[in-house]
Amino acid sequence: MISLEQAIIGTMLNDDSLFREDIPEELFSEPAKLIYREMKKLHKEEGKTFSLLQIIENLKDEIPIEYFNSILKNTSYINFSNAESELKSFIRELQETKVKESVFKELKALSEEPKFDLERFKKILTKADIPETETEDSSIEFCLKEFIGLTTSKSPGITLGLPTIDRATRGFRFGEILLIMARTTVGKTFLALNILKNIVSTHTEKIGFFSLEMPKESITERLWQIYFNLNAEQVLAVSSNLEYQEEFLNTFKNVEIFSNIYSIEEIRRIIKNKNLRIIFIDFLDLIKTEFFSSLYLKTTSLITDIKKLAKEENVLIILVHQLSREAEDGSIPVRLNMARDSGAVEEKSDFVIGLWRPEIDEESGEKFKNKMIVKLLKNKRGDTKLMECHFDKQTGRILEITNEY
């Protein structure tokens, strides 16, 4: 994992015009703090100019050359054509990291006390909210211009390929979160991949699919099944066919699949470096994070960071999440409050879709064979909706067949 403080220092050393005097020195540890102070000193004395060689020469008796080599290594991946945005992101992430470290220490100390202090607990949590330091155009004129531009745009919102939901939401927009939740084996990943298939047929934005549970080859196999409408055996039979390969690659050319376990900060970096606009995360619980004393705190922190990620990077995030045991075996109707570990998950999401399959229940299985019930449980632009879909378990295709109002 990169050193954020070295990334900040290295970005400014690479381009002195990006130097910022307003970074709190307490964010840095030694020797990054010494370098920052030297840059600040030269920035004032030399008329906003300094260089890496100059800094190295001035600090050669205090900082070993190996530390500067480490800075260069840490910044070798940075897209310097977008360095100003990268620098803001590094500073924000370092601030958040320091705050979280402080909050964690206070929470740990609180947990060790014999009596739990609820009011103190609430005060500690409020420290985790870092105010936005960047200015924005908040005038009503600007807001109206944005709204008119949205309503008159010839480009429709991003659609899922589920007509009832697409009509009810009027399409999805960048900066929003769509949550898909169901019990294990109901078909969450299959629905996500069906949505991916529809998006690539109607939009040209770059897409990142973060499969934190399944390997790349399994996701690719399922995409083949859905796209070509084949079962697993048929996919194996035609996978070596060059015409099939060429069609598949051409159709999904804007899609990148990631299967490592990433943190939110690492996903943010990938979004920036790959210029991704639509993000699938399968699933929430597997995102890498620091240690928390409870699943509630961990999940609340994760969904809060994902909300900030969607807004700050202006990306659409389609997030998969597991349901609690209250949803039983996945055959009963899903309610909004069934999200596992934290109620913040449905609160922070702009839209929530719940899935269940009555056929899983032995008594009603035959009646609902190959049926998946999809319900729009939360819709910030209108009413909730319920629809019945045909789920072909052989190919993984999901198609809407009826809806209720």
Image (cartoon, grey):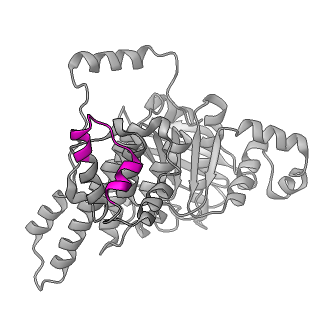
Quarter of the image for residue 315 reads: top left
- Is 349 left or right of 162, judged from the image as shown? left
Tell me if residue 283 comes above or below residue 180 in the rendering: below
Q: Residue at x 38, y 55 (%)?
A: 56
Is residue 51 covered in magenta? Answer: yes
Q: Nearer the viewer, residue 156 or 271?
A: 271
Query: What is the x, y in percent for residue 159?
Result: 54, 32
Q: Nearer the viewer, residue 174 or 339?
A: 174
Residue extent of the magenta highlight = 40-59
Hey, which residue is sitting farthest bottom in the picture?
114
Tell me if residue 193 comes above or below residue 286 in the rendering: above
- Is 24 left or right of 119, judged from the image as shown? right
Q: Residue at x 24, y 15 (%)?
A: 141
Q: Main secondary structure of the magenta part?
A: helix
- Is 114 left or right of 319, judged from the image as shown? left
- Is any atom of residue 315 visible in this view? yes
- Is any atom of residue 384 visible in this view? no
Tell me if residue 210 comes above or below residue 228 in the rendering: below
Can you say which quadrant of the picture contains the C terminus?
top left
Q: Residue at x 38, y 44 (%)?
A: 51
Q: Nearer the viewer, residue 401 or 226?
A: 226
Query: What is the x, y in percent for residue 172?
Result: 46, 33
Is residue 67 covered in magenta? Answer: no
Query: What is the x, y in percent for residue 321?
Result: 47, 58
Tell me if residue 91 comes above or below residue 216 in the rendering: above
